Amino acid sequence: MPAMRPTRGFRLLAVATAISAWVLVAVGGIVRVTESGLGCPDWPLCDGRVVPEGAKEPWIETSHRWVAGIVTVLVALVAVWAWRRYRSRRDVFVPALTAALLVPAQAMLGAIVVWLELPGWIVGVHFVVGMVFLAATVLTAGAAWRGGVGATERFVRLAWWTTGVSFLLVALGAAVVSADADHACGESWPDCNGAFAAGGGDAWLQVAHRSVAYVIAGLAVALAVQAYRGRGPRLAGTVPLAAVVLQISFGVSLVLAGEESAAHEPLAMLHVAGAGTVWAALVALAALVGAPRLAGVPAFVPARAR
């Protein structure tokens, strides 16, 4: 039996949910960069109010919570729809259910961050779980839209390997945030304080983060070349490279501008949003081309080809 392709309505809802999850990551980055995490001293209200009063920090933190509420509703709708209609499509149903299960976990982590007044390691865990949540929504949307996307097995494996390495980059980025090592290398690039990694453990952590970013850039180039040669989807295969180039430019500009520069805050916001963009682009590509084929298992043939 050919796999049931989700309706257009479900596919559009899944895409809207993935986009809203990316917006949530971006707004979360604004909260961190502007140090607005304690703009609301309590949770779920803001200083006992639904609508905050006063300075910008409470408004920024409240906007993050409002976006999270919208995302929660969208994720719940996708999960219920997938449960009712597409349980036979595990590639759609499993990530949809995973995203729904991660909502209360992420909300609790956000509450703990406020209650404990922004401990670094909890902020880092909150960021990583947020990226996993984003991946679950993107996987749902990508699998729902996947049809006759042509890709060689080599391209599929390269896409999934690149996605795996990019998760390492996400984890290292969270570690940099947790250790407050954003400026461990000062305003020095491509070296670190005049050497490969001078300045102690934080400098080594920053250099590790940079090094994995360079590996991702190389893998993104390989994906783009393979896609251009017709071994994978051209548009989806080249988007990660464009996102990586922009993200590296944001990161380098952030270092060279310095912490005291007026450009520091907007560049830091763009860097967080860029991290979500690179991660989402790679996860979407992996979802579109499908999982790598196991040895001895026939390749998937789209329903239209059957």
Image (spheres, rainbow, N blue to C red):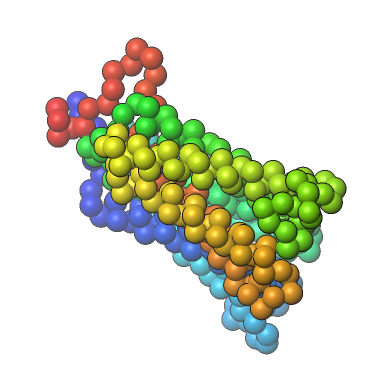
In the image, farthest residue toward the bottom: 54
Q: Position of residue 42 (x, y in %)?
A: 72, 70
Q: Is residue 40 above or below residue 170?
A: below
In the image, farthest residue toward the top: 296
Q: Position of residue 269 (x, y in %)?
A: 59, 67
Res. 69 in view: no
Task: Give the side of residue 104 with respect to residue 3, left or right.
Answer: right
Task: Give the side of residue 239 with respect to residue 50, left or right.
Answer: left
Q: Position of residue 132 (x, y in %)?
A: 54, 46
Viewer-nearest residue: 169 or 256: 256
Task: Give the side of residue 37 with respect to residue 99, left or right.
Answer: right
Residue depicted at 31% across the width and 29% down the height: 152
Residue depicted at 56% across the width and 55% down the height: 248
Q: Position of residue 172 (x, y in %)?
A: 67, 46
Residue depicted at 76% across the width and 56% down the height: 185
Res. 212 in view: yes
